[in-house]
Amino acid sequence: MTAKDIVLNEVAKTVKKPSVDFVRYFALILSLSIFAFSGYKIVDMLYSYVAAAKHHDELRELFYATVDEDSEDAVFLRKARVNIPIKDVLSLQKQTGERFIETETSESVNSVDQNRYSMTKLRDRNPDMYCWIKVSFTTIDYPVVQTYDNDYYLVHNFDKGWSKSGAIFTDYRNSRDIWDNRHLIIYGHNMIDNSMFQPLIDYSKHESYFRNGIIELITQDAMYYYEVFSVSEEDPYSGYIRTEFTDDEQGDEEFVEFILSMEERSIFHKNVTLDKDSKIITLSTCINEFWIDRRFVVRGVLIDVK
């Protein structure tokens, strides 16, 4: 090897070294960037869950607030006629400027009065307030809202602020009067922190939940109780959220066929009466598997109204 060859080799080494260092530095910066971004996303996710939990606790505190029998609100409720919506009495109160409206009186603040009062407070906060939902054997205990489409409350909370958890909401096609719905549909996200409609998944794991499950809806004027009769996975494009049936014999036949198919697709089965006069509720949430576009559904049939 000549002196010239040695010089050329040394020059080649000095040329390649910066290239190797650049690749290493780039890989390091890329790794740190990915790590930082991942950390940001995790923190952002945790913050959104904490904020949503705090928000829901605040709404529950408002809903379950007990009216002191000696408070002005309790006196007002006792003076309100029990067989008319409290919102009508409140309207009279605003129109007349009187704190107390002289009507037939009740002896005390009963559960119906309490619900009317709580629902009125929530509706004043958000006019989209529809009802309050509770599902036995779960932590589902939330307000339900309704608006002009099925998209808005996917990413907005009860107070209409942006939220990954969204809100529990009913299908925009459903009537504002629960009694008028043959098929009432309510949606909620399947959140990994066990909030919103995630606990519904437990109905696929515990047959005892299925056999004894009750879905309760609370409005200003009544409490509706649905007995769970079907739990299943559904294709989102299968028509499982159909709400319209004609008010004739053909419509009745289609409705009965529709609800019987719900029972047939159920993971578990039990004896339950389903006919053209049945009123059905469907609770729908996503299944958190990226490769599967499916919905998990719990259905109930109305058995009591109080």
Image: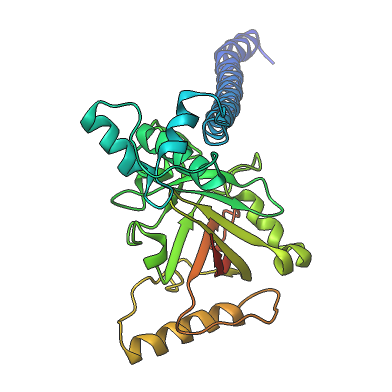
Residue at image location 46% in from the left, 71% down from the top: 240
Q: In this view, does 89 lie above or below 266?
A: above
Q: Nearer the viewer, residue 228 or 28?
A: 228
Q: Which of 93 and 217 is in front in this view?
A: 93
How far across and down, in percent of the image, does residue 151 sit?
A: 36, 49
Q: Is residue 174 above or below residue 5?
A: below
Q: In this view, does 209 lie above or below 89?
A: below
Residue 218 shown left or right of residue 207 in the figure: left
Residue at image location 63% in from the left, 67% down from the top: 228
Q: Nearer the viewer, residue 110 or 122?
A: 110
User: Farthest residue toward the left?
Assistant: 95
How far across and down, in percent of the image, does residue 27 sit?
A: 59, 23
Q: Which of 23 and 43 is in front in this view?
A: 43
| Picture quarter with the N terminus | top right
Residue 244 shown left or right of residue 55 in the figure: left
Number of numbered callouts drawn: 0
Q: Is residue 122 in view from this perspective?
A: no
Residue at image location 59% in from the left, 82% down from the top: 273
Image quadrant in which you'd find residue 272: bottom right
Image quadrant in which you'd find residue 122: top left
Q: Is residue 109 in view from this perspective?
A: yes
Residue at image location 47% in from the left, 30% down from the top: 75
How far across and down, in percent of the image, does residue 282 sit?
A: 51, 64
Image quadrant in which you'd find residue 205: bottom right
Query: Which color scheme does this rendered protein use?
Result: rainbow
Residue 125 shown left or right of residue 22 in the figure: left
How far across and down, in percent of the image, does residue 301 sit?
A: 55, 71
